[in-house]
């Protein structure tokens, strides 16, 4: 009698421990069927059901038998497939994964900065002509970004490194109309005898981003990817204006700067059928930026002689914000061994207080700290990603 009671206690303890372990599991299962049975419960061993799961899982209780199958990470899940109280990871998870992925993007961006007006046209008679501001018009330019990443086992974190490059050149040129005058905006010296103006703006934007993230399901058709990391890089600019009187008088301005600081944001994926999704991504950065500024202006009457030459170094804490909205598609292939993803979207970025060239010129000219205009970038981004 004692032996039977002891065996019953051991058996109940074993069954209770197995059920508790299943309830505490962080691995989601996809429920296929639920069949009531009257026979004795069957004991099975729970296994991991990532892509390396070869056979569907089956575990049982005294009431029912539940069959499960592997799930495709990063895609929509059936209802009631996630345990309560745990945000199951939603990153791409290939079978026998090495944890690496590569990505790249083609950029078609438009860059614009405040304070680049080279001159203004002032009509002699406002009744017959309209004044206007002369500045680089701007156009879309090609760029790229490229990077790589690694998926950690530790709570399914992901580390990603990305490099972004956009270099552009914009220009403007105009002669003096007969019914007015040209007033220079980038000369410390004043003159009303200018017959022609031209200017060229060069931007070299090189950004380095390192971020740590964790993708997780919020429901079955929505994935959030909060991330935190560092943004560094270089933002260099040149603005060369030329004013023609008797001869050409150059006015040269340049800033070289480097940045580094924290970056935080999140990405959301609204999962549709057949691997399609809408996505949105937003981030903010607050970085330390060191500017090396240079100004050189030639004499109006003797262009071979330097009239003003200024060098200045200043440090600032600058903000940056970005937002991207788009549509994407992805799929596993080779029995889940690899994953391919393609997406396209439109992005907006703003870098506050970047036109330190104009700020230096205005400060030296008026002895008042000049206003540094913001750098605004927007345009298309088309991306590819490969997980293996």
Image (cartoon, grey):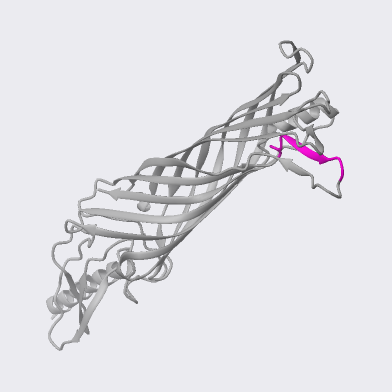
Query: Magenta residues?
Result: 115-125
Q: Quadrant of the N terminus?
A: bottom left
Whether residue 62 appears in this view of the structure is no
Q: Residue at x 47, y 51 (%)?
A: 380
**Can the viewer see residue 302 in this picture?**
yes
Report which quarter residue 236 is drawn in: top right
Q: Is residue 59 magenta?
A: no
Depth check, front residue: 305 or 235: 305
Up-down relation of residue 331 to residue 152 (above or below): below
| Rendered view: 137 above or below 194 | below
| Position in image of residue 323 (x %, y %) | 54, 54
- How many marks on residues? 0
- Name the residue: 71% across, 11% down: 304
Residue 162: x and y, percent? 42, 40
Q: Position of residue 144 (x, y in %)?
A: 42, 41
Q: Which residue is drawn at the image coordinates 80% and 25% (left, top)?
A: 188
Whether 34 is drawn above or below 161: the answer is below
Residue that extends furthest to the front in the rendered view of this protein: 178
Q: Who is closer to the viewer here, 66 or 330? A: 330
Confirm whether the magenta stretch covers residue 118: yes
Q: Quadrant of residue 241?
A: top right
Give how far across and how far down residue 165 sits, in percent.
47, 37
Q: Nearer the viewer, residue 243 or 329?
A: 243
Q: Nearer the viewer, residue 94 or 329?
A: 329
Task: Tell whether 298 sits left or right of 2.
Answer: right
- Residue 217: quadrant of the picture: bottom left
């Amino acid at each position: 009698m004692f032996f039977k009671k002891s065996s019953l206690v051991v058996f109940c303890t074993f069954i209770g421990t197995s059920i508790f372990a299943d309830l505490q599991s962080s691995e989601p299962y996809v429920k296929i069927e639920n069949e009531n049975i009257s026979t004795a419960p069957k004991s099975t061993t729970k296994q991991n059901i990532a892509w390396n799961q070869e056979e569907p899982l089956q575990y049982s209780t005294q009431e029912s038998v539940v069959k499960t199958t592997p799930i495709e990470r990063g895609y929509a899940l059936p209802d009631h497939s996630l345990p309560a109280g745990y945000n199951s990871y939603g990153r791409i998870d290939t079978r026998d994964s090495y944890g690496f992925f590569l990505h790249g993007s083609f950029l078609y961006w438009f860059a614009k900065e405040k304070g680049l007006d080279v001159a203004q046209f002032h009509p002699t008679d406002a009744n017959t002509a309209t004044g206007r501001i002369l500045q680089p018009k701007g156009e879309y330019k090609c760029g790229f970004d490229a990077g790589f990443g690694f998926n950690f086992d530790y709570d399914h974190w992901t580390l990603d490194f990305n490099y972004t490059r956009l270099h552009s050149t914009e220009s403007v040129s105009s002669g003096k109309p007969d019914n007015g005058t040209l007033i220079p905006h980038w000369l410390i010296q004043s003159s009303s005898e200018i017959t022609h103006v031209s200017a060229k703006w060069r931007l070299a934007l090189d950004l380095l981003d390192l971020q740590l993230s964790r993708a997780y399901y919020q429901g079955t058709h929505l994935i959030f990817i909060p991330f935190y990391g560092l943004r560094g890089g270089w933002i260099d600019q040149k603005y060369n204006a030329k004013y023609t009187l008797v001869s050409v008088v150059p006015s040269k301005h340049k800033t070289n700067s480097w940045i580094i600081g924290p970056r935080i944001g999140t990405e959301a994926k609204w999962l549709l059928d057949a691997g399609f999704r809408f996505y949105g991504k937003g981030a903010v950065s607050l970085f330390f930026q060191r500017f090396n500024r240079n100004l050189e202006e030639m004499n109006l009457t003797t262009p071979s002689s330097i009239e003003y030459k200024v060098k200045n170094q200043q440090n600032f804490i600058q903000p940056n914000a970005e937002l991207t909205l788009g549509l994407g598609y992805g799929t596993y292939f080779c029995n889940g061994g690899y994953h391919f993803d393609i997406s396209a979207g439109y992005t907006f970025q703003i870098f506050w207080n970047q036109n330190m060239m104009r700020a230096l010129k205005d400060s030296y000219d008026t002895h008042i700290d000049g206003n540094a205009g913001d750098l605004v970038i927007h345009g298309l981004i088309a991306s590819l990603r490969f997980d293996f």
